[in-house]
Image: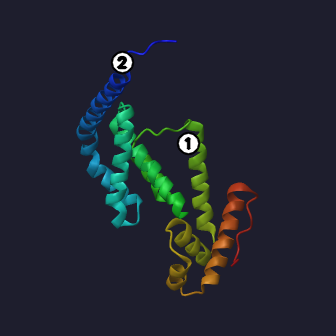
Amino acid sequence: MKKKTPGTDFDSAENCRAEAVVASSQAKAWFVREVLPLEAMLTRFLTKNWRTKSDLEDFRQDIYAQVLDAAETRIPDRAKPFVFSVARNLLVDRFRKEHVVPIEAVAELDTLNIPADEPGPERSVIAHDMLRRLQAAIERLPPRCREAVVLKRIEGHSRREIAERMGIAEQTVSDHIAYGMRILADVLYGEPPEIGGGA
């Protein structure tokens, strides 16, 4: 059994705290130097991809907190792709929680020329092909059905808001959405149906 030297546990804990302070101060310096200059670009990205403008400040702070936490473990080599990757992931998480899939958010990432942590070009080609097929299928839906699906699944409006906007009953909105989603699922995952009058 190894004999402990008095005070070594305390010294070890003090060394860990000192290293953490150094890492934290380096991460903060990196954050100020590399991340804060991206604020205007990040704000434009969030404004374009998040419909609730009152949430933008909190959302940006959440991004900053995650970026700084990660930097305290390991400072990223390139700040811009890292920050926008965190932003994109938080957007996706929030959209999932709200059951909203904004097609514009996916398209916006392509225009930023930011390398994403994607598995490879094949998956990217497949995803873009599926997005094109989805857009084509949405365009082929009957007009009222298409309007209800876009308002609900892309823009995130409630059935009540859609009913008021379209001047129809909430149940009719539900019928339009259900019919449209069945057609879209068939087009994307099954045999393409005949798209007709429907609901």
Q: Position of residue 48 (x, y in %)?
A: 37, 59
Based on the displayed image, in which of its 4 quarters is residue 113 positioned?
A: top left
- What's the CA distance linking mark 1 and mark 2? 59 Å
Q: Residue at x 55, y 83 (%)?
A: 163
Asked whether, in this view, residue 137 is left or right of residue 89, the answer is right
| Residue type of the residue flagged with mark 2 | Pro
Q: Amino acid at mark 1?
A: Ser
Q: What secondary structure is marked by label 2? A: loop
Q: Residues within 10 Å of mark 1 (few under 14, many from 20)?
A: few
Can residue 176 be seen from the camera position used here? yes
Q: Which colour scheme appears in the figure?
A: rainbow
Secondary structure beneath label 1: helix
Say which mark, if any, is on residue 124: 1
Along the line of sight, the residue nearer the viewer: 194 or 37: 37
The residue shown at (42%, 16%) is 4
Residue 32: image location, x then y, percent: 23, 40
Q: Is residue 78 above or below residue 130?
A: above
Residue hosting label 2: 6
Left-right relation of 141 to 95: right
> 67 or 19: nearer the eye?
19
Q: Nearer the viewer, residue 141 or 114?
A: 114
- Percent position of residue 28, x then y: 26, 38
